[in-house]
Image (cartoon, rainbow, N blue to C red):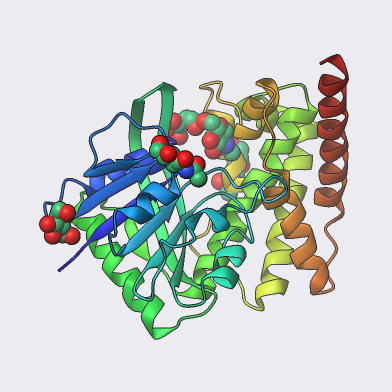
Amino acid sequence: MSNEILIFGAGAIGAFYGSRLATDKNVNVSVFGDYEWQPTRTFGNASEAQKAGVKWDYVIVSTKALPDVSDDSELLQGLISEGTAVVLIQNGLGVEEPYYRRYPQASILSAVTITSAAQPDHGVIKHNKWTRINSGPYPSDSQAATKKNRLLNELLVKAGIKDALPYDAAKMQLLRWHKIAINAAFNPSSVLSQGADNASMAQDPDLYEHLKAVMEEVFTAAQKVMGQPFPKDFASAEQILNSTKRNTSGSKPSMQLDWESGKKMELEVILGNPVRLAREKGVDMPRLQTMYALLKMAQTKRECASKSKM
Ligand SMILES: *[C@@H]1O[C@H](CO)[C@@H](O)[C@H](O)[C@H]1NC(C)=O
Ligand SMILES: *[C@@H]1O[C@H](CO)[C@@H](O)[C@H](O)[C@H]1NC(C)=O
Ligand SMILES: *[C@@H]1O[C@H](CO)[C@@H](O)[C@H](O)[C@H]1NC(C)=O
Ligand SMILES: *[C@@H]1O[C@H](CO)[C@@H](O)[C@H](O)[C@H]1NC(C)=O
Ligand SMILES: *[C@H]1O[C@@H](CO)[C@H](O)[C@@H](O)[C@@H]1NC(C)=O
């Protein structure tokens, strides 16, 4: 059976899953992006990948999601056919929609990972302790996408990712909302508090109250938007805060790292999209909306300032 996998996105997550999947001799993993690990093929860009004439079974997208900067779904033009599954391993809500709209012939799979993989140096991926990945069809449990999802899961499990679990479409979106609750609480709050780390924020009584309220705002909105409750095994805001308090490794959310290094923050997929998706269903998210508006303006002002210096 053919198992041609193309990875789009040269970060820690894509390289980690790519290198794991490649341990199966019945799988070819190719990448496009700037790479040093030894995949089956490496392409400089999408049009090079297209010229290879390979029929891709899976295209894994693990880029940073910045819909306000570019629509990355466009870059996959010519690589997607009827049997292809586009697998989105990205942060945020609503990341699947542009791919779903552009490639109705493909199966769209949505995935969330808690992989402690980091890229300390160019070409060096450090994988720490645990890995969990859940994936599910988007936007509904179509037969083709469900089958692709099951096959992908089998490949992941065979590649030694024991904590890989297939979900149905609804449970997958609930999980995305749950992850967004954590990201929407910790990421912007770190930037707005001048770079406080995870544990310091959870230990501060006033920030504790704020983080808990943000997570609960998202949990409430999610269950209204999805019209169903969270599964019982999803952690509560209090459980998340308790474990974050104890983890005093000094780690900071990715949005703060982006802000520190002058990069664009994932404001749209972490804050803007949840606010808009909830609003469509008549649900307001005042805490998220406030942080979204403040950070968007901070980012705009900084961009203007750096342009006027040039
Ligand atoms: C991997 O690529 C090689 C060379 O292009 C091809 O012969 C082989 O059939 C591919 N294997 C799979 C599992 O797709
Ligand atoms: C893709 O890469 C090839 C080879 O490096 C180059 O010739 C070509 O112009 C690039 N195409 C685009 C669209 O960037
Ligand atoms: C969180 O920690 C507090 C204080 O240690 C404890 O009282 C509470 O039961 C914990 N809550 C959960 C949900 O673990
Ligand atoms: C603490 O956080 C770091 C970074 O997020 C993570 O790698 C580590 O596994 C965490 N430790 C525990 C005990 O959860
Ligand atoms: C804060 O740290 C970053 C970087 O290690 C992690 O990615 C986040 O998951 C973490 N957030 C929480 C709530 O622990």
**Residue at image x 68%, y 37%?**
187
Image quarter of residue 79: bottom left
- Residue sitting nearer the eye, 284 or 108: 108
Q: Quadrant of the C terminus?
A: top right
Residue 87 falls left or right of residue 301: left
Q: Examine the rendered structure and indicate whether residue 294 appears above or below residue 229.
A: above
Residue 144 figure quarter: bottom left
When the figure is inspected, residue 4 is found, relative to residue 166, above or below; the finding is above
Q: Residue furthest top?
A: 309
Up-down: is 147 above or below 27? below
Q: Which residue does the image show at 59% across and 57% down from the upper left? A: 178
Where residue 241 appears, as percent x and y from the top left, is: 62, 40
Residue 82 vs residue 37, the one in the foreground: 82
Ligand 3 falls in quadrant? top right
Residue 217 seen anywhere in this rendered image of the structure: no
- Check the image and report above or below for 130 versus 226: above
Question: How far across and how far down the image is residue 231, in percent?
Answer: 52, 68
The mark tally for this picture is 0
Residue 148 locus on image (x, y percent): 33, 72
Q: Residue at x 33, y 34 (%)?
A: 129
User: Does residue 1 appear to the left or right of 284 in the view shown?
Assistant: left
Residue 106 visible from this viewpoint: yes
Quadrant of the snapshot with the N terminus: bottom left
Residue 54 relative to residue 284: left or right: left
**Who is closer to the viewer here, 208 or 292?**
292
